[in-house]
Image (spheres, rainbow, N blue to C red):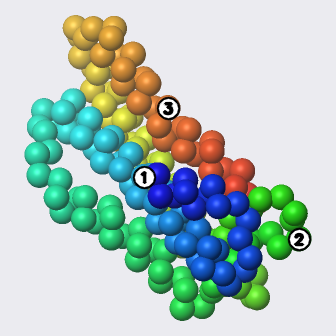
């Protein structure tokens, strides 16, 4: 939700508090949301494949809130928050920017896009293992199979939604 507030601000002037707020909130919150999809996929995997339930997620929740903050702040040692497309008159959001294009792209990958695609791959892996387990079961209701098939939409949508942005930014 906070990430959506950042995007709703529209294009912010480089170096402004609004730009910094927008960049920090969108990056950290989107990473956190994407990491939560891994927790969901892992919980489904545990229930179907391992026949367990993850009961204490306190440490996972702390990681999911702290890791994106760190991943959002660390790149600031060599880049700044600014509009990635200064020439555009359309709304853009503030993201990692540097005068050195190689540094900018490196931090965009390491600070955001790499985690988006790793998370999508992890979700596909967990859900694929669930699908395999269900496929091997003799008597499984069609509703269970349909539900697990629908779970594949989460990482697929994440991948498809972020692919154009990552191609454009990189």
State the image coordinates of residue 119 (x, y, percent, origin top left): 44, 53
Q: Nearer the viewer, residue 24 or 106?
A: 24
Residue 58 occupies which quadrant of the picture? bottom left
Which is more N-terminal, label 1 or label 2? 1
Q: Name the residue under label 2.
A: 87
| As drawn, 54 above or below 75 | above
State the image coordinates of residue 95 (x, y, percent, origin top left): 64, 71
Q: Is residue 170 visible?
A: no
Between disc 2 and disc 3, the foreground one is 2
Label 1 neighbour load within 10 Å: few <14, some 14-19, many 20+: some
State the image coordinates of residue 130 (x, y, percent, origin top left): 31, 31
Q: Is residue 145 visible?
A: yes
If the image is split into quadrants, where does the C terminus sit? bottom right
Label 3 neighbour load within 10 Å: few <14, some 14-19, many 20+: few
Instruction: Name the residue at 83% across, 73% down.
Output: 86
Instruction: Name the residue at 24% across, 65% down.
Output: 62
Numbered label attached to residue 153: 3
Instruction: Name the residue at 62% across, 51% down.
Output: 162
């Amino acid at each position: 939700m906070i990430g959506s507030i950042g995007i709703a601000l529209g294009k912010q002037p480089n170096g402004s508090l609004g730009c910094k707020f927008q960049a920090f909130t969108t990056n950290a919150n989107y990473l956190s949301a994407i990491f939560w999809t891994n927790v969901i996929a892992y919980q489904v995997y545990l229930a179907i494949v391992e026949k367990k339930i993850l009961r204490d997620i306190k440490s996972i929740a702390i990681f999911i809130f702290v890791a994106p903050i760190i991943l959002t702040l660390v790149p600031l040692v060599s880049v700044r928050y600014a509009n990635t497309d200064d020439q555009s008159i359309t709304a853009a959001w503030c993201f990692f920017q540097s005068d050195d294009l190689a540094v900018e792209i490196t931090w965009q990958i390491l600070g955001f896009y790499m985690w988006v695609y790793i998370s999508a791959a992890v979700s596909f892996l967990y859900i694929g293992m669930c699908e395999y387990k269900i496929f091997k079961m003799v008597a499984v209701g069609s509703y269970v199979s349909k539900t697990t098939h629908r779970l594949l939409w989460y990482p697929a949508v994440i991948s498809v939604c972020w692919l154009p942005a990552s191609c454009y930014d990189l």
